C-alpha cells in the first residue's frame, strides 16, 4: 500500500504549469521535521516535492504559499529521465490526493476558542 501523510511547512511559493493538453499541475515542497540524534533540541528537516493535478492544483495555488503549515496526503511515485549529459536522473515525488491547512493561531486577547478535535491530523 502506498499512502502517505506528511505535515510540514511550504518552502517556497508553489509553481503552476499546464501540460500540452491543458491539465494544470502545481508543484511545491514542504519541510518536515525529524529528530536529530546528535542534538535533541535541533531537529533536522527533510524536504519533499509535492505534485498536485487538476482541481487540486487550483486549490494549492489559492491556499498555499511559502511558510504555510500543511498536512498533505498522497502516494509516492518515482520517475526518471535522461539529463542533458545523458545521465539517468531519478525523481521521487508525492502525488497529492488532498491537503489541510493548519489553523492560524489566534491572539489570546480575542476570546477565540479552538477545539483541536476539529483538526484532521
Image (cartoon, rainbow, N blue to C red):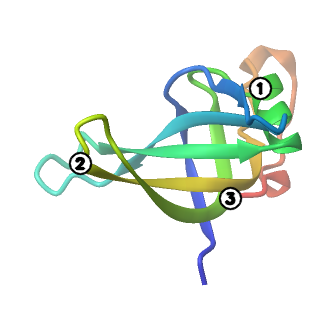
Specify few, some or many for label 1: CA neighbours under 10 Å numbering under 14, 14-19, or 20 or more. Answer: some
Residue mark closest to the camera, 2 vs 1: 2
> Between marks 2 and 1, how big is the CA–CA gap?
33 Å
> Which residue is labeled 2 in the image?
87
Residue 60 lies, with reference to residue 67, above or below; the image says below
Q: Secondary structure at mark 2?
A: loop
Point out the image quarter for the N terminus. Answer: bottom right
Residue 62 lies, with reference to residue 35, above or below; the image says above
Indicate the quadrant where residue 106 lies: top right
Q: Are marks 2 and 3 in contact (CB under 8 Å)?
A: no
State the image coordinates of residue 28 (x, y, percent, origin top left): 58, 33
State the image coordinates of residue 72 (x, y, percent, origin top left): 66, 51
> Which residue is labeled 3 in the image?
73
Q: Are marks 2 and 1 in contact (CB under 8 Å)?
A: no
Q: Residue at x 78, y 57 (%)?
A: 120
Is tag 3's residue or tag 1's residue first in the polypeptide sequence?
A: 1
State the image coordinates of residue 18 (x, y, percent, origin top left): 75, 30
Residue mark closest to the camera, 3 vs 1: 1
Residue 11 lies, with reference to residue 48, above or below; the image says above
Residue 109 lies, with reference to residue 28, above or below; the image says above
State the image coordinates of residue 51 (x, y, percent, origin top left): 63, 45
Amino acid at each position: 500500500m502506498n499512502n502517505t501523510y506528511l505535515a510540514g511547512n511550504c518552502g517556497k511559493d508553489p509553481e503552476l504549469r499546464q501540460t500540452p493538453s491543458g491539465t494544470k499541475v502545481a508543484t511545491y515542497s514542504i519541510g518536515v521535521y525529524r529528530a536529530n540524534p546528535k542534538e535533541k533540541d535541533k531537529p533536522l528537516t527533510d524536504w519533499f516535492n509535492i505534485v498536485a493535478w487538476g482541481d487540486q492544483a487550483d486549490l494549492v495555488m489559492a491556499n498555499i504559499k511559502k511558510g504555510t503549515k500543511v498536512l498533505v496526503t498522497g502516494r509516492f511515485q518515482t520517475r526518471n529521465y535522461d539529463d542533458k549529459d545523458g545521465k539517468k536522473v531519478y525523481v521521487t515525488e508525492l502525488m497529492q490526493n488532498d491537503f489541510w491547512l493548519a489553523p492560524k493561531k489566534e491572539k489570546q486577547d480575542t476570546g477565540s476558542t479552538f477545539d483541536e478535535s476539529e483538526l484532521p491530523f
